[in-house]
Image (cartoon, rainbow, N blue to C red):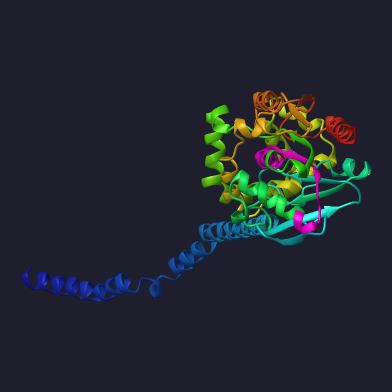
Amino acid sequence: MRASRSRSGRKKAAASSAMRPWMHRAHTDCYPRCPKILSLASHTAIQDPYPRRLAMKAKVLVTIIGIVAAMLVVLLVCAAWQVADKYPRNVAQTKAGPIEYTLLGQGPVVLRLTGSMDDCESSGGNEALLAAGFSILTPSRPGYGKTPLSVGGTAPEAAEAMAALMDRLGISSADVIAESSGGPTAIYLAARHPERVRKLVLEEAVSKYMKDVDPKGFETRKKFYDSQYGYMRYILKILARVAPRSLARVTMSIFGTHDPDEAVKRMSKADIDGLCSFYLRWQSSWGQAASNDMEQAAEDAVLNSTKAPTLIVHSRGDAAIPFAVAEYSHANIAGSELWEAPTWSHMISGPEAAIVDTKVVEFLKK
């Protein structure tokens, strides 16, 4: 038995010894000894959809990034693309400093003083005046276009600058039409140089200090020009290029009291094109000029000194400059006429614009 166990033990030991190398190789180098397992593992790796899904997602992401980048480039081009000038610009070297201007037509001169955020390329009402036989002198007020703000940082200084421009161009007198923030300059010019102003028209024009009239609106607009204008002008320019009717709606909602959708429906294509041109001309420095405009007003004594025949044109639909401002001007300018315009907002547009043009021309010609 003992010998038998010994032989049995040797057989087991031999079998165990024969198995150990295989077990070791199976542990350390299984695939060479197990081709079926290798084949299955390779097939699974090739067929696993995860890498393909990952590659597909990467391609989609790259495509999206490319589209977004292309859109940003297009939008930046839209924002930077300057609108072509409609009229030839000139710069006069006056005793007050350089003043940019346009001069159109032949006949008695009308000096147009535009509102904030506008320059000598402004064209509102020009066709009616030219057709009536007037010539139109439109300066870029101080801070706009190529006229430095230093030429006239206050309304009295700006009025002297306008008189200097008239001197330089050999214009002894003119009818004056002032729009919006151009009002204080026009009023000071008429009061201090009565011989230079034949007639005065104030269209939706400022006279009283707006902070006293509408404190909340004043602070909102002041904040826009002082801290938001830098980036908002790009957004508005993009809208002017890609969504002009939407821009018109936004404008009417801010500057008018009527339903903006209805207001836009009343605007012609020329009205909307003119509005877009207005926004597309905005320059980086104009925010400072507009903020400065908001600090200007005409004192009671200056209004009382205005002797030129005066027509005050104002709409009750003007949300930027309340009708009360026009009433204040009317009460302080002796003999002035207050005419309630049928327009729907601060902007003179829509079918009623022709009515306003006719009224102004009739007043200047009588």
**Camera-nearest residue between 229 and 326:** 326
Where in the figure is residue 320, as x and y percent of width and height?
65, 32
Where in the figure is residue 309, as x and y percent of width and height?
79, 32
The relative height of residue 263 versus residue 4 in the rendered view (above or below) is above
**Camera-nearest residue between 41 and 14:** 41
Where in the figure is residue 347, as x and y percent of width and height?
74, 35
Name the image quarter holding the N terminus: bottom left
Residue 287 visible in the picture: yes
Location of residue 324 (image quadrant)? top right
**Camera-nearest residue between 79 and 59:** 79
Q: Residue furthest front?
A: 195
Residue 242 visible in the picture: no
Where in the figure is residue 287, as x and y percent of width and height?
59, 49
**Camera-nearest residue between 88 and 148:** 148
Does 126 sit left or right of 151 as displayed?
right
Name the image quarter holding the C terminus: top right
The relative height of residue 81 versus residue 301 in the rendered view (above or below) is below
The relative height of residue 149 versus residue 332 in the rendered view (above or below) is below
Does 102 appear in magenta? Answer: no
Residue displayed at 66% across by 49% down: 160
The magenta span reads: 167-190
Does 216 sit left or right of 134 as displayed?
left
Residue displayed at 15% across by 75% down: 10
